[in-house]
Structure formats: structure tokens, C-alpha cells
Amino acid sequence: MAPVIQVRGLRKTYGDIVAVKDVSFEVAEGEIFGLLGPNGAGKTTTVECLQGLRRPDAGEVRVLGLDPQADRQTLRQRIGSQLQESALPDRIKVWEALDLFGSFLGREADWRTLMEQWGLTPKRNASFGSLSGGQRQRLFVALALVNNPKLVFLDEMTTGLDPAARRTAWDLVRQIRDRGATVVLVTHFMEEAEQLCDRVAVIDRGQIVALNSPQGLVNAYASQIRVIFTAPAGADMSWLEQVDRVKKVARRGSRVEVEGDGPVLALVSAALVNHGVTPPDLRVEQPTLEDVFLTITGTSLSG
Amino acid sequence: MRALGKLIVVELKLFLRDPITLVFTLILPFLILIVMGEVFGRNAGVSEMYRNVNAMDYYAPAYVGIVMAAVGLVAIPVHIAGYRERGILRRLRASSLSTMSLFTSQLAVGALITVVSVIVLMLPSVFIYHIQAPSSLPLVVAASVLALVMCCSLGAFLGFVLPSARAAQGVGMPLWFFMFMLSGGGPPRGVMTSAMQTVGKVMPQWHVTDLVQDAWLGYGWNVVASLVLLGFLVVAAAITFLAFRRE
């Protein structure tokens, strides 16, 4: 099956600023594909080139088999877009927005079902300006879906949402995919990419620096596991360094942090028991995409 | 076409829900007309100051232009600048809505509001101040259409070059008052100093008044005024188009 998106050697500059240096990737049908990176990395520019909102300086872009520049109108009828930092007029009502965007397609759109599915029916006569952040986000996603698109772009859909609303939004994204659409998710939240994406492209300074499944990225770039527990401040723990798979032992007062990889948790636990140490607070920290990002780019995303 | 129809209906509703645009396009022109009518319109008698007609015969055609100026200088710039500032324009462009539909809807809403507001103005003009009927209705309509399209493209121009809705409001409103006062819609031209007249002539509203008033009072089609308005229209539309492309 032909990929839904094909990008080869995409480049886009604004004056002297190179927003996207050289980006290539493919997205398969039914995937939730993530573009992950800090603000200003070139994620949104990349997506805007795919949507036909910007003309690339170089490179080949095919979306649903179409050229986003030449076939802009056709393409926009087949894709759905939720844009970063976009809005609707404050005084437009929920049903009016859905009805209006549904009419752009030229045929009757079933926006009432969509309004029901996304929990907007109780708010149908509310104005956009009176909606909460979560309700607005649901409306934007509903608008992105009103033309029943094969491909949906979601750019920073959970920015500004509280944690509960964010989790709801994640469920909604999974629902979109389950309905058979391919999803391109732009985010700078590690956890979001980890939770949702089948594959993630890590973008930094206009380039893709890594591309794999979230677990694959973790395995490849951040295999370090941390085992953490407390022990009496003075207790001799130097024997821990002899335990197989342990790379490093750090102590901060009564807190002990053991770094290692593979089955290090099991090995450290066994050694602790053998030495008669049974801390009640033994826990393990698995590496996350955050660590991957730190390893690859040398900078923290959330910092 | 269906999309354009829906867009016009929604844009019209948004227009009617916005108190500022309503005040400037419907309420203020009406109040100004009533005030001028009560002060000058009751003393019947032609005056040289008013181009040898009654005061309200002079003012009523000028106020048709004032309504269109409110559409073009206040309503449309604030609306479009707000759309750009808040990312609404981006969202609309990402949908399959065509650029033409977007501009057509603004023009259509501007035309509808103008028609309604002019009808509202004509009620007291006709029934209280007994103004004379247009000497040539087709010429008045033609003059108004040209003036309206010019005002709308001026509005789109302001909406695209000014950074925010607030800036558009800050520029558009004073400009509207200024043009209103110096175009002959406030003090009649006969009492203006030559400096006031010179400044007035630089602005499009002066020529809108010329074009509509001449057609109304039987002076025929003012060729110079129509060419000036056409010039403003073309330049504003061209800059708007370039700004839109760059956006």
C-alpha cells in the first residue's frame, strides 16, 4: 500500500532562518505518527508544508498521493486540520461553526453526529468565546473531522489543557484512528507522544534526529534504568557497585540511586536481600522519551 | 455556492452580534442625521452653502457615504485584523474554503448592512425632512456601488496591514470621524477653510460625497470623483492581495 505521506528532502527557510533543513519521512495508513521536538524545531512548518499552507523551498512532498501545492483544493477537502494557535470568532455558536465548516465540502456533512460524539451537543448554542479550553479543543477536533478526512493533522492539541482534559483528548485521538483515519500529531509533550504514537520522529533544529516507535527510541537511546531506595545514611553500600549490570551508584544523604540496564532491578533486589537490606520504598524509574531527547540533543524538552 | 451562502449568513450574524460595528454602521449615522435634521432641516429654504438646495437634501446623500465609510473604515478592518491576529484566517484557509469566497462574503455583508442602514436613514429623511427624490436613481445606485466596493477594499487593506483588531479600531475610528467631518457630511464645504478643503480632497470620502451627491441632486456622473475612487479601489485591492499572499 502506498504511504499516506511521503516527504523527501523537505527544506523551508524564512529569510536567513532555516526552519526546516532537510526532513524525510513516510507515514503509513492507520498510523498515529508523532512529530516531537522543542518549540521552534520546525514541526509546525513541516506540517504546514504538508497541508499546502506553505510552499517548500526544496524537496518532494506527497500527501494522499497529491502535491499539496498543485492540488491544494482537492487535498484540503480530504484532510482535516487542527492548527496551533488558531481560533474562531468569539461570537460564533458551536452549531454554526460545525455547519459552516461542513458546508465547505460541497455536500451535506453529518455534523450533528460529530457534535454528539464529541460531547458538544449540550453546548450547541454556546458562543465560541464562552467555551472552556477543553470544549474549544473538542470543537476544533470536530471541525477537523467534519469532512470525514482520511488524514488528520493535530498540532499541539493539548497545549493549555489541564491534565484531565489532556487525557480526554488522548482518548479522542485514539478514537479518530479507530475510525480508520491516519493521524499526524505534533507535540512537545513527551508523555503525549509516548501514550499515543505508533512511531515518533524527533525533530531538532530543522532535522529529524531519530525516528522509531517510542519503545524503540527508548531502547536505542536511553537504556539506563534507575533503581532508587533509602538506606541509613552511614551504611556501607559500596558492594552495590560489584553487582552485575550496575553502572553507577550515587548517594544523597539516605537516598541511594543505582543506575544500570537490562535486568538490573532483579539483580539489585537480590543483592539487597542477600545483604539483609529490605528497603520499603524500593522503586524503579524506566527511561522515557524525555531521556531519549536529552541523549540525542543534549537539551531537555520540558526545561 | 452553498458554502458561500452559509459563510455570508454566518458573517452577517457575527456582524449583528458585534456592538461596535452596529453602533458605527447603523446607530451613529442615524443619530447624526436626526441631530443635523433637527438643527438645520426644519428651517426650510435653499442656501448657497448647501449647493442651492435644502440642508437635508444636501446631507442625506452625504450620509449614504458615511454609512459605507463606517463599513469600510471600522467594521471590516476590525473584523479582518481580528481574524488574522487570532488565527481565524489561518483556520479558514486550511479548510477547503476558497479565497474568493472569503472576500466575497465580506463584500456581501457590507452591501447588506449598507442597504439596511440607508433604508433606516431614508425614513426620517423622507417623512420628517421631506428631502427631494434622487434626480437619477440608477446613477445614485451606480455611484453607491462604486463607493461601497472602494470602501470595502479600503477596509480589507487596513485589516491586512494593521497588526491587530485593537490597532484597526484605533486607526479606523478616528479616520472615520475625520473623513466624516472633512468630506462635507459635517460642516458644509461652503464654510470650510481652504486648508480644511485641501485636506478633505486628499481623502476618498470627499469624492464619495461628490459622486453620490452629484448623482442625487442632478449634476450627473462626476467623472473625476469616480476615477479617484477607482484609483483608491485598485491600489487598496492590490496591496491587500499582496499582503494576503504573504500572510
Image: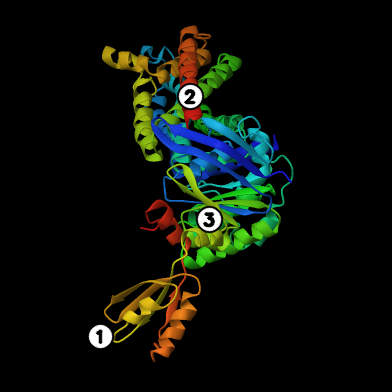
The answer to whether marks 2 and 1 mark residues whose Cβ atoms lie closer than 8 Å is no
Residue A131 point in image, percent of width and height: 51, 58
Work out whether A97 lies above or below A284. above
Tell me if mark 2 has few (under 14), some (14-19) or many (20+) residues whose alpha carbon lies within 10 angstroms of its own.
few
Tell me if mark 1 has few (under 14), some (14-19) or many (20+) residues whose alpha carbon lies within 10 angstroms of its own.
few
In screen coordinates, is B191 left or right of B62? Answer: left
* Amino acid tagged 3: Arg
Work out whether mark 1 precedes mark 3 in sequence or the reverse, and give the earlier one: 3
Give the distance between the C-alpha atoms of the residues marked 1 and 3, in whole angstroms: 55 Å
Q: Which mark is residue A136?
A: 3
* Amino acid tagged 1: Gly
Q: Which mark is residue A234?
A: 1
Q: Which one is in front, A167 or A282?
A: A282
Of badges 2 and 1, nearer the viewer stands 1
The chain carrying label 3 is A
Using the rendered view, name the quadrant where residue A229 is placed.
bottom left
Q: Which mark is residue B242?
A: 2
* Amino acid tagged 2: Leu
Q: Are marks 2 and 1 on the same chain?
A: no
Looking at the image, can residue B129 be seen? no
Tell me if mark 3 has few (under 14), some (14-19) or many (20+) residues whose alpha carbon lies within 10 angstroms of its own.
some
Give the distance between the C-alpha atoms of the residues marked 2 and 3, in whole angstroms: 32 Å
In screen coordinates, is B166 left or right of B111? Answer: left
Q: Which mark is residue A276?
A: none
Of badges 1 and 3, nearer the viewer stands 1
Q: Quadrant of the N terminus of chain B?
A: top right
Q: Which one is in front, A292 or A190?
A: A292
